[in-house]
Amino acid sequence: AAKKDGRGRARTFTRSMLIVLEQREMLRRSLRTALSEGQFFIEYQPLMRSSSSVAGFEALLRWRHPLIGIIPPNVFIPMAEADGLMSEIGQWLLERACRAAATWPSHFTVAVNLSPAEFLHEGLTDRVAQTLDLVGIRADRLELEITESVLLERTTNNLDTLNTLNVLGVQISLDDFGTYYSSLSYLKNFPFDTIKIDQYFIKDLERDEKSQTIVRSIIALAHGLGMHVTAEGVETRGQAAWLQNEGCDRLQGHLLGFPMPAEAIGEFLRKSPSASVAGVLRT
Ligand code: C2E
Ligand code: MG
Ligand code: MG
Ligand code: MG
């Protein structure tokens, strides 16, 4: 009887596993044509200075699947990476985001995320330089965001790539700081302009003294190294006030602005600087 039960359970397990696998396989297949079918779009989330002015926008990739609807980047980007598609998608996004930035006030920056495969791609630095040339925006208006996971491998090449980008004049941010294999040697060896503190530490900032100590230390560390600090995932006035008081340079999160389509930026700018955002930050 035990044997039968065991087999039964094994069969059920296999079947549901199969369904998951088939769904993933279906997604992966449609991912291959998503770019040529025009299914990707970009939302832009504001990055606010603590003084309450807009510093720029971060480009966030979305996939509108014709049957499933909008699929978040955390789901499809790892698939695109595994299938070698991310480099091409990333190039599409980089050019498009830079073209959007070219229509904004010229002191606004645009932040673009780079996945490991994009960062490790041989032609990355040439591609960035060519895109800036083509679109005609200053290099310091582009911020490239990479996570620590990117830096785990091929250390000398990584340093070369970051130094080349630095020489081009592009800004480099260390995204999701504190969540991966945070190693202080990255901060010593690599030329970052900005550290972005992961929302994990911001979430419970108002209640948790440990998070407060960690965030305070990251701010001091960044400033001591001549880098700027951005807090991600700021959702409450209490968090914003605390961060402002501790000297955090920039804030990003739903409190200050949701990711929005490029066409909504004009209205956001007309409404925000004077009214809601300043009200939020100047308390
Ligand atoms: P990220 O670069 O750390 O981006 C911030 C994420 O936090 C975004 O999720 C954003 O929508 C979300 N977020 C912003 N403010 C708040 C808030 O107040 N509360 C909460 N709970 N969440 C907030 P999203 O758009 O789903 O992107 C997830 C990740 O996917 C990004 O994390 C980034 O690592 C990756 N990603 C997004 N777009 C791209 C892209 O174009 N290329 C690459 N390589 N990766 C991308
Ligand atoms: Mg980012
Ligand atoms: Mg982040
Ligand atoms: Mg993240």
Image (cartoon, rainbow, N blue to C red):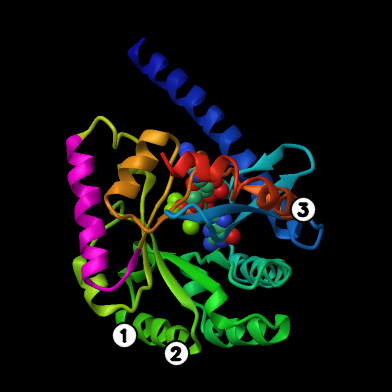
Q: Which mark is residue 167?
A: 2
Would residue 185 appear left or right of 57 to someone viewing this image? left
Q: Residue at x 66, y 52 (%)?
A: 269
Q: Nearer the viewer, residue 217 or 157?
A: 217
Q: Label 1 vs label 3: CA separation?
A: 41 Å
Which residue is denoted by mark 1 in the rendering? Answer: 156
Provide residue 232's location: percent of width, then percent of height. 42, 49
Name which residue type carries label 1: Thr
Q: Nearer the viewer, residue 15 or 231?
A: 231
Which residue is denoted by mark 3 in the rendering? Answer: 263
Q: Are marks 1 and 3 in contact (CB under 8 Å)?
A: no
Q: Quadrant of residue 6?
A: top left
Name which residue type carries label 2: Val
Q: Earlier in the sequence, mark 1 or mark 3?
A: 1
Residue 219 colored in magenta in the image: yes
Q: Which mark is residue 49?
A: none
Predominant secondary structure in magenta? helix
Q: Is residue 16 above or below residue 235?
A: above
Q: Label 2 vs label 1: CA separation?
A: 16 Å
Look at the image and give the residue range highlighted in magenta. 209-228
Q: Earlier in the sequence, mark 2 or mark 1?
A: 1
Q: Residue at x 46, y 18 (%)?
A: 8
Residue sitting at the far top = 1
Q: Nearer the viewer, residue 231 or 31?
A: 231
Which quadrant does the N terminus fall into?
top left
